[in-house]
Image (spheres, grey):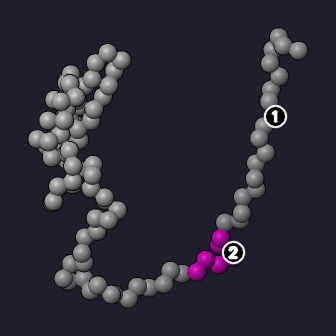
Amino acid sequence: MIVIRRMVDRHQSFTGIFLPGEPARIFPTTDYEHGRILQIYKQDRPHEGIINDFTDLDAFIRPPTPTEPASAPTAKPAATSPATASPPRKKRKPAAAKPRRGHT
């Protein structure tokens, strides 16, 4: 997957293009040039069939495969017995401030 990011320094702006397994490509660009790069690589807005920054990955769920039934019964998880459950943790009090040297 390609990642395109805008990086702004105090005096200059850069565009970084990152590909897995490749060294990062970072070069100075204007706002117009950066916008054009986003258009070319289809990162400027949501596009059908393309996963980019505008894709809602939480809503992107694959449909079940034909070999997998949609409503397969699942086994209930085993209940945790009180003997195996971890005891509740006590709240910690914040440590007292240490005295500073040379100050009274």
Whether residue 8 appears in this view of the structure is yes
Q: Which residue is mark 2?
A: 83
- Dot 2 surroundings within 10 Å: few (below 14), some, or many (20 or more)? few
Residue at the far front: name it.
32
Tell me the kind of residue under disc 1.
Ala
Tell me the kind of residue under disc 2.
Ala
Looking at the image, which residue is at 29% across and 84% down?
Answer: 70
- Quarter of the rendering occupied by the C terminus: top right
Q: Which residues are magenta?
A: 79-85
Query: In this rendering, would 41 be left or right of 80?
Result: left
Q: Which residue is mark 1?
A: 96
- The image quadrant that residue 89 belongs to is bottom right
- The image quadrant that residue 12 belongs to is top left
**Which SS class for mark 2?**
loop
Q: Earlier in the sequence, mark 1 or mark 2?
A: 2
- The image quadrant that residue 50 belongs to is bottom left
